[in-house]
Image (tube, rainbow, N blue to C red):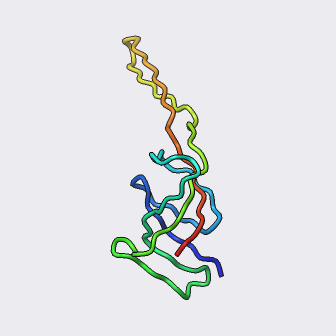
Amino acid sequence: MTKFAVIKTGGKQYLVKEGDEIVVDRLENKEQEKIELETLMIFTDDGDNIEIGSPFLKEKTQAEIVSHEKGEKIRIARFKAKVRYRKVKGFRPQLTTLKIIKIN
């Protein structure tokens, strides 16, 4: 019987279980620091126990920050036909890796 949770961070929602490592948008906390994430829903894999928040549950999901890193470079190209206009920009997103410690 595995416990799953739907958490929210950075305006996005993630489906996690204990021990998972997820990559999210950068958080301002330091590495190895423990944080609590907003929990939207908790359920088990057999489907017996389901708790749904409105919008959040009182229980929080505990996670630890593993590392801060940069993502893959994204190339953004602008192009206009017949006028020889070409412009290329690059962007590397700032990311944080989290390890889910405990789902309450």
Q: Residue at x 56, y 42 (%)?
A: 68
Front position in the image: 45 or 22: 22
Single out the residue that lies furthest toward the top: 84
- Count of labels in the image: 0
Single out the residue that lies furthest toward the bottom: 48
Q: Is residue 69 left or right of residue 8?
A: right
The image shows residue 9, relative to residue 46, as above or below, that is above
The location of residue 23, given as percent across then percent down, is 56, 50
Q: Residue at x 47, y 64 (%)?
A: 7
The location of residue 38, given as percent across then percent down, is 42, 65
The location of residue 8, given as percent across then percent down, is 43, 61
Front position in the image: 13 or 18: 18
Q: Is residue 64 left or right of residue 55?
A: right
The image shows residue 98, relative to residue 36, as above or below, that is above
Front position in the image: 44 or 80: 44
Image quadrant assignment for residue 54: bottom left
Q: Quadrant of the N terminus?
A: bottom right
Q: Residue at x 50, y 76 (%)?
A: 42
The image shows residue 92, relative to residue 68, as above or below, that is above
